[in-house]
Each structure stands twice: as structure tokens, then as C-alpha cells.
Image (cartoon, helix red, strand yellow):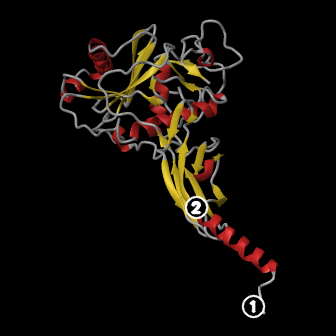
């Protein structure tokens, strides 16, 4: 007699199981096709902007995401997170590429942290990205001034973003055009030859001396106004600017150590704590002086008062007997900003080449 044999159906089942085992061992998923997931967080972007992160991984996986969340059904392996730049009020936010490992039957976590793009310190102007009218931001010290690295530690980036976002909130999205390089403000560093004591001795003419020295050093160029954060003193104010044509020039300045001996020294005011923080005194001072350099407020404006407006202390360009509490760009829309137009002879920021969408 012949030994008994298993039914043919059993042979087929054993063969199929063996084939499945071989197939599973040849890919990068767990036995049974188990997959993992990735919990992705995205931070650092201003409200109103949308992230742009490309996620790539094993087996040609590719997905673009615009917000945080959980990506499921991922083959085990290494995934690359590439954050594309996001622009807000003309300033780029970026995040370095990162990798994360996803395991089967587990959830990995990763964070894409956006931040304003910054550039290394430079004492020379980088190649301009545009020939259009613009403001060049500078961080300037007297010869004996203490270098606080405000141009490289993020301070000036935060304050610039704060007042640019305020302009955008007042104009329906427009802001001042800045000198930029590869999507970041081209902040120029300079140390002048004169001491702080010598500079402050010039009194109300300190701005004139500052402009003369910086222009002589080659920092002036066509269609460019200088917006200078001067880390030195000023006995009379926290800011001053050219006021063409009455006071020709190209420089507006914020004096970070001005009024040192007064009850309200300029240095007692903090910079914006984040790029999206509401502007404070130093931000409004920069925004105010930047407009003076355009010749605002015109002498023929209805509420004109000695280069300013005198009707409302909440106006950015107010100066008068009341305490200044800036909050509005041209309260009456009759003096220096009106998209619908102003009378002939009045400089209108709304039509200025220095204001861009």
C-alpha cells in the first residue's frame, strides 16, 4: 500500500503561504503590511499666511501640506520635510529641511518651525534685488558705541516686520518697499568715525552729520532712502528725518539712546517681542520718520502743523500738545494718505513709489 498523502488543496495552501512570506520580507513594511503615521506641527508663520511643506519618503511618496496634521498609512522609513518659503509683507519666512523616521505600527512626530529669513552681518550693500524706490535699513554705531548686534540677533527683523504689518493693516495690504537680498532685509552695519559725545554735541543737527558721514562712506544710492537705527544718543528726540524740499536729504533715523537724561528716555521703550507683535513706540517712530523722508506732511494739508498734523494724537504723523498715541494712518484721509486721491500739491503716500502691495 502507498502511504497516505495530503490532499492537493493543502499543497496549494502551503505554497501560497510561503510565497506571501517571501514577498513580505522583500519590502520595508512590517509583516502583514503594517504602516506608521507622522504627526506634523507647523509653527512660526503669521496669521493669514499658509505653509508650504513638501513631505517625501520611501516608494516615491510625495505630499504637499499647508497645515499641521497627521499623515497616515506611511511605509516605514525615512521622510524628508522641505519647507518652501512663505512671504509676509515682503519678508520671507523659511525653515531648514529636516528628516524623520517613521516606524510600522507607531506614530512619529516632527515640527517645521518657520522664522524670518536673516542674513549675516555686512558692512557693504549687497546687490539690490530691485531698482525701484526703497528704504535701506542700517544699524549704525558711533566710534565708541557698544555693539548690541541688533542687526544679527533678530531684533531689527522683528521691529521691521511689526511696523510693516501695521502699514499693511492700514492700507489693505500695502507696505513700504525695503532693500532686500534673497528675500531678507539687507540690513547694513556701519560704525562712524565720531564718538557719541561728539555726535550729541551737534544737538538738532545730529541727523545732518549722520547723513553726511554715511553718504560720504558710500551708503547712498539712487532711489534709496536710508532708515537708520542709530545706537547712540540725541539730546532732543528719539527720531528725526529729512523733510524735502524744506530739509533736503535721504536719511531718517531712530535714536535708540536718545533723551538719556529725560524722564522718558528712548531706551526705556522695548522693541516688538515678535515679528507679529503690535507696534510700540519704537516701531511707530520708525514708521513716522520714514514718511517725513518722503516730504510728508505737505504744508498745504488741511491739518498741517509744522511738518506734522495737529488734529488728532492717534494719527501716525501727529505732533502737538497732547500725548502721541499713534494708531491710524491719516485719521481724516485728507492730509497725506488717501487711495481715492488728494488735492494737487499734497504728497499722497497711497501713490508713492515707496509703497508696494
User: Quarter holding the C terminus?
Assistant: top right
Q: Report whether 148 appears left or right of 79.
A: left
Residue at the extreme bottom of the image, as rendered: 1
Q: Report whether 17 appears left or right of 261.
A: right
Residue on which the image places disc 1: 3
Q: Secondary structure at mark 1?
A: loop
Residue 275 at x, y = what percent?
50, 42
In percent of the image, x 45 and y 22: which residue is there? 179
Residue 234 at x, y = what percent?
30, 29
Residue 314 in view: no
Estimate how packed mark 1 is, as few (under 14), some (14 to 19) or many (20 or more) residues with alpha carbons within 10 Å: few
User: Quarter holding the N terminus?
Assistant: bottom right
In percent of the image, x 40 and y 43: which residue is there? 269
Question: Is residue 57 positioned above or below 217 on the image?
Answer: below
Residue 88 at x, y = what percent?
57, 35
Residue at the extreme front of the image, as rendered: 1
Measured in 3D between alpha carbons, the distance from the residue under mark 2 to the one under mark 1, in whole angstroms, is 43 Å
From the viewer's perspective, is the residue at label 2 or at label 1 nearer? 1
Residue 108 at x, y = what percent?
56, 63
Q: Nearer the viewer, residue 16 or 49?
A: 16
Residue on which the image places disc 2: 28
In the figure, residue 249 lies in which quadrant? Answer: top left
Q: Nearer the viewer, residue 225 or 25?
A: 25
Q: Secondary structure at mark 2?
A: loop
Q: Of label 2 and label 1, which has the lower sequence position?
A: 1
Q: Report whether 61 appears left or right of 217.
A: right
In percent of the image, x 53 and y 26: which residue is there? 317
**Which circle marks residue 46 in the picture?**
none
Residue 221 in view: yes
Q: Nearer the viewer, residue 206 or 203?
A: 206
Q: Report whether 145 appears left or right of 18.
A: left
Amino acid at each position: 500500500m502507498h502511504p497516505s498523502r495530503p490532499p492537493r488543496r493543502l499543497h496549494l495552501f502551503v505554497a501560497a503561504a510561503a510565497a506571501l512570506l517571501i514577498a513580505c520580507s522583500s519590502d520595508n513594511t512590517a509583516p502583514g503590511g503594517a504602516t506608521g503615521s507622522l504627526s506634523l506641527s507647523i509653527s512660526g508663520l503669521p496669521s493669514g499666511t499658509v505653509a508650504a511643506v513638501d513631505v517625501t519618503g520611501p516608494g516615491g511618496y510625495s505630499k504637499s501640506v499647508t497645515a499641521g496634521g497627521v499623515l497616515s498609512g506611511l511605509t516605514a522609513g525615512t521622510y524628508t520635510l522641505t519647507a518652501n518659503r512663505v512671504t509676509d509683507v515682503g519678508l520671507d519666512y523659511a525653515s531648514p529641511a529636516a528628516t524623520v523616521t517613521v516606524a510600522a505600527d507607531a506614530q512619529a512626530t516632527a515640527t517645521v518651525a518657520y522664522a524670518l529669513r536673516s542674513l549675516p552681518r555686512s558692512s557693504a550693500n549687497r546687490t539690490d534685488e530691485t531698482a525701484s524706490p526703497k528704504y535701506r535699513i542700517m544699524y549704525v554705531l558711533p566710534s565708541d558705541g557698544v555693539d548690541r548686534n541688533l542687526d544679527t540677533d533678530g531684533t531689527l527683523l522683528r521691529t521691521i516686520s511689526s511696523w510693516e504689518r501695521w502699514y499693511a493693516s492700514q492700507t489693505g495690504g500695502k507696505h513700504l518697499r525695503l532693500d532686500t537680498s534673497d528675500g531678507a532685509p539687507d540690513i547694513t552695519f556701519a560704525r562712524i568715525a565720531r564718538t557719541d559725545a561728539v555726535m550729541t554735541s551737534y544737538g538738532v543737527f545730529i541727523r545732518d552729520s549722520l547723513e553726511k558721514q554715511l553718504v560720504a562712506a558710500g551708503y547712498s544710492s539712487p532711489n534709496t532712502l536710508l532708515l537708520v537705527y542709530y545706537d547712540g544718543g540725541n539730546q532732543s528726540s528719539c527720531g528725526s528725518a529729512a523733510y524735502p524740499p524744506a530739509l533736503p536729504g535721504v536719511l531718517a533715523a531712530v535714536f535708540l539712546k536718545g533723551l538719556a537724561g529725560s524722564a522718558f528716555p528712548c531706551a526705556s521703550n522695548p522693541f516688538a517681542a515678535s515679528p507679529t507683535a503690535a507696534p510700540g513706540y519704537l516701531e511707530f517712530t520708525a514708521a513716522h520718520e520714514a514718511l517725513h523722508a518722503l516730504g510728508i506732511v505737505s504744508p498745504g494739508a488741511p491739518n498741517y502743523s509744522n511738518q506734522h498734523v495737529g488734529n488728532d494724537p492717534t494719527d501716525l504723523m501727529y505732533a502737538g500738545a497732547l500725548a502721541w498715541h499713534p494708531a491710524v494712518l491719516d485719521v481724516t484721509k485728507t492730509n497725506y494718505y488717501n487711495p481715492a486721491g488728494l488735492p494737487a500739491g499734497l504728497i499722497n503716500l497711497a501713490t508713492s513709489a515707496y509703497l508696494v502691495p
